[in-house]
Amino acid sequence: MLQFLIVLIPVLPLAAFVINGLFGRWLGRAGGWLAVACMGGSAAISLPIFVMAFMQGEAFEPIAVTLWQWMAVGGLDIQVGFRVDQLSALMLLFVTLVSFLVYLYSMGYMAGDPGFNRFFAYLGLFNFSMLVLVLADSLPLLFVGWEGVGLCSYLLIGYYLSMPGAPDAGKKAFIVNRIGDFGFLVAMMMLFFAVGSLNIQAIVAAAADEATRPALLAYGGGFVTILTLALFLGCTGKSAQIPLFTWLPDAMAGPTPVSALIHAATMVTAGVYLVVRLSALFVLAPATMMTIAVIGAATAFVAGTIALTQKDIKKVLAYSTVSQLGFMFLACGIGAFVAGIFHVFTHSFFKACLFLGAGSVIHAAHHIQDLEKMGGLKRAMPVTRWTFLIACAAIAGLPPLAGFISKDDILWRTFATGSLWLWGLAVVTALMTAYYAFRVYFLTFEGKSRLPHDVEHHVHESPWTMTVPLAVLAIGAIGAGLLNLPELIHHGEWSMTSLMLAPVIAPAQAILEAHRDHQVHVGLAVELAQIGLSVVVALVGVALAWHFALRTWPTGAERLAHRLRPAWRLSAHRWWWDDIYMKFVAGGVWGLALVSSWFDRWVIDGLLHTVAGLARLGGRGVRQLQNGQPQLYALVFLLGVNIVILLILWL
Amino acid sequence: MDDPQLFYDHVIESMWLTLPLLVLLAAGLVVLAADVLLGRERSSWLPAISGVGVAGALAALWAVGVGPEPLYAYSEALVLDRLTFYADNIILGGMLFLFLISPRWLEGRWIPRGEYYALLLFAAMSMMALGRSSELLALFLNFELLSICFYVLIGMDKRSERSSEAGFKYFLLGSLAAAFLLFGIVFVFGASGGMTRFSRIAEALAGGTVEPRLMALGLGLMLVGFGFKLTLAPFHMYAPDVYEGAPTPVVAAVATGSKVAGFTAMFHVLQLTLDWAAPVGLWIALYAIVVTSMIVGNVGALVQPNIKRLLAYSSIAHSGYTMVPMVVVLARPDLWLGARDAIAFYLLAYTVMTLLAFGIVGSMGTAGEGRIGAWAGLGRRAPWRAAAMALAMLSLIGIPPTVGFFGKVALFRVAIDGNHLWLAVVGVLASAASVFYYLRVVVTMYMEEPAEAVESPRLPGMATALALAVAATGIFLAIWPLLAARPY
Amino acid sequence: MELMIQGNLLLAAAIFSIGAVGILWKRNALAIFMCIELMFNAATLGFISFAQALGRPEGVAVFLFVITVAAAEAAVGLALFIKLFNDKGNIEAEEMNLLQD
């Protein structure tokens, strides 16, 4: 029974896809409601499973369902199977819940859109893939989900075909993700080579077992380092990390519910999920762990600085997502996998709330997204305003909201590992987070209205289908942190996410403990001090935002921008990251171009052009030969015959 | 066989074993008669009769069934074994699809309905017969029977000069190929001491009493004949022109059923040599043909702006891939069972993908059957058809987890098992190059705006639905490849 | 005996080659078609020679089959030529280049 229900979790959204895809034309709005109902069903199944896993904690028996044998090729035996353990249960909970709320919200947001059913069909397909990704018990199946979510993301980014930039943004996301997929595929091949199986349990077991570990640690650990780096390349693509993060802000061209669901709450966290899933593998490669931590911290910082000055409300939120994802990878990189995945969990609530709130504003303001043209919306849109404020407070890290608890956990653990400069980077980023979040809030809801007059009169609160999801998500943004209070409060006596997830990351933890040279021990006082510091940092950020975005707006900010011109330009131009890409990467010459552009231009490029040119030339040659003369064809035929005869008679 | 009773029993048993062929033959005759009796107004009955005929043949095929041992009919002229059974299923399934899409495609075209359906039925019968041939003369006759059906079908469009020209080209090269096949048969006949039955030839080869060079020459010339039917380079030259000029459903039959039959027959011929050390020259000739096909097919398609020509080159390349296990078997006879299964599964995969592609091409109207540029923006105008076409393209590339991927894995695995790693590498590299031109179709459909007003494609509801059915088959095979990969 | 089969085979091969060259050489589709017939007949000659030499008279029966097939081909081929003639006004092989890259 339970197994049947688990199969139902991804199948219900698939049904939504099929219904809306095939019969949407005739169903109209009813198709949308059916999709909401399907997703609600998935959530209704996932919730008790999570409660069960949460209450039982370590005692929870993972539920496995094997559906059928998928392929059996040369020793590679792959079953299509699902497995629900504590980690999947946690992922299931927020994926289905947030998806359900976004579906409901879309009923309002997308009402009257000509592609209403197409939209829900894509959403259904997306959720099916996402849930397959979460439930998969083998890497190939996970990869199917991984590709599926990428495909839907691509389709939904380009949803507004007529909007300038939308198809291009879709293309960009597509290409960047292919680069990441390449890494994933390479890693899978290497894993099969070393482990002989692609089942996730088998891989983790092989990494945890002293007897099988040497196969992975071949070449002095170089094997597993390259393997995990290749995997991580896949993660940087999907989860928008340096150097592959530029697609995510562009992806905001899609409809706002999509931004909330796919590009904030669920799909982009798949990379973090993968790292935690295979944590036992990653901890075998300290170099990779270090890379993950550094890239995570750097991404968090860079994206944070960019978010400070963006004018488009969705762009701010997009860079904020990139930045928060950086936090999650930082946590994973330093070995605090639970902290990372828990931040995924809380982030999904408050970031979805922020995006949906932004969508509500955009909806009301007739698709104005420019922060400088907003302001003073708090009277007209009370529900949106309060929920947005709560979510801002959560992301800024104000206690006791969810964002505070999960982010503080990451900061604290980074501090405890002793890499102070990573910690410093993270603290500065936290400051910036508080600033940009409240900057958006103040510019949108407080102060005087800067909207055009004709729009201003029509601003109204959104329908219930949109406000109810906002309220639920706001509650999540307040309360989700309760599921993982710091140990100094719960003393291991209550069920907590960290305890629940312990068995999942136990193999990784064991390896980490075994390899740690010295136990870093930091006292209670330091922990309290660090918590205090996070609070202060958050408050300072909020105060700065109040000062620059409300009290002295817009002169104060302008003056500051003028004084810090280089830094401001760096942020406003997004570190010229896109331009660098355009010049060096998208132009066809890869990362090496900066260092050795000559080599690239004359050797690599030349080689590529030669190969491509030869192939093209060959193609032309083949076509030249194909001149339509039947007797020429007969001649080629007879020449072929002669060669065959000569080969046989003279060899 | 001197006892008349025994002879009588043998004929009855033979007819039972070839019941599906007889059903098709009868259906074809009924169609011809019905065409005359019913008149033009009721020509819509003809595809229905044909469809029923093919369905009946499928039913007969399963009623007769197949066992582990090959069964012979008509004094060993035809054989029924597991390979032919599998191939017959593919052929009949594909033909059913073609009968279902043909009525809409034929609308407004000057093609006589009665002859069209009857000849397609006869062609289906000839395909099955060709695949089942187990005697030299039967092989030649079935080969010619199939060719003659297609000479007519290809040149059948009365108002199209291109169709006539395609017919002429197919006719010229086809006759040439038949002549070489016949000459090859002469040498095999002579070298084996006057044997025509495959079983006897195999015995003679195993016995070591055969003049190897003469035998190899015979087999080599037969290979040339097959090379025409399977569009193997350098005997492929007619393919792009014929694919472009001929009626689309006919091309689909030429590209799928005809090749399935050709590969089945060729595998039976190759099976003769299992206990015989073939001269090196034959090996090298085969290697050369396989590699050339893979290269010419993929390179030729790179800069091809016409969709049907592109599919022709694609078909050349895929024949090259499918040949890989054949070549390996020559070197490693112990792998022949695995090779047979791999080839059978790939033929199924290839047929599904190719029929899907041609089904969509056929639904695109005159402009869409030509330049790929006319497909721009199809993703928006006709999302389902675009999705089905994209699926076909991805599958032809062999992207996991499409059916094409599993098929290629099966093929190249035989090469790796048989120590022909380099052949697998060439195959993989060649298919890597194919990404370029297959994806160009996808990119055109989804990411390009129509440059000028294109003729809006007709929406033959039935054809679309059926294309989707084939797409569903493709998806199903991708989800559950083992179901089809273990037919025996 | 041995000599005879070799002689016959050589003759067959020669006729076959003449046919093949003729296909490339001739311009008129009908003439090309006749060259193909020549090749078929050469192959049949080879078959009969082998049958004779190896003492397997049933090989001679091939002759009948091949003639039949050739007749069928001729029927279809001539129909095609007539259609081409109606379309183009001639049946020169050189003119058949409507379909090309």
Image (spheres, rainbow, N blue to C red):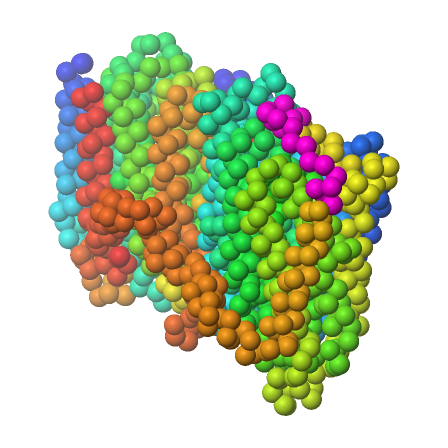
On screen, residue B51 above or below B45: above
Q: In which quarter of the image is residue A126?
A: bottom right
Q: Is A519 covered by the magenta stretch?
A: yes
Which residue is pictured at 66% across the width and 83% down the height?
A448
Residue A441 percent location from the top left of the image = 67, 70
Answer whether residue A485 is visible to the viewer in this image. Answer: yes
Which residue is pictured at 44% across the width and 31% down the height?
B412
Residue B134 percent location from the top left of the image = 44, 27
Q: Give the range drawn in magenta.
A: A510-528
Residue A153 percent location from the top left of the image = 58, 57
On screen, residue B38 above or below A65: below
Answer whether residue A610 is visible to the viewer in this image. Answer: no
Q: In which quarter of the image is the C terminus of chain B?
A: top right
Q: In which quarter of the image is residue B487?
A: top right
Q: In which quarter of the image is residue A210?
A: top right
Question: Front-most of C86 and A141?
Answer: A141
**In the visual, does B117 lie left or right of A593?**
right
Which residue is pictured at 77% across the width and 62% down the height?
A474
Residue B51 percent location from the top left of the image = 58, 52
Question: Front-most of A339 and A154?
Answer: A339
Question: Front-most of A120 and A177?
Answer: A177
Question: Front-most of A194 and B12?
Answer: A194
On screen, residue B112 above or below B256: below
**In the visual, does A582 lie left or right of C10?**
right
Q: Is B103 covered by the magenta stretch?
A: no
Which residue is pictured at 55% across the width and 63% down the height?
A307
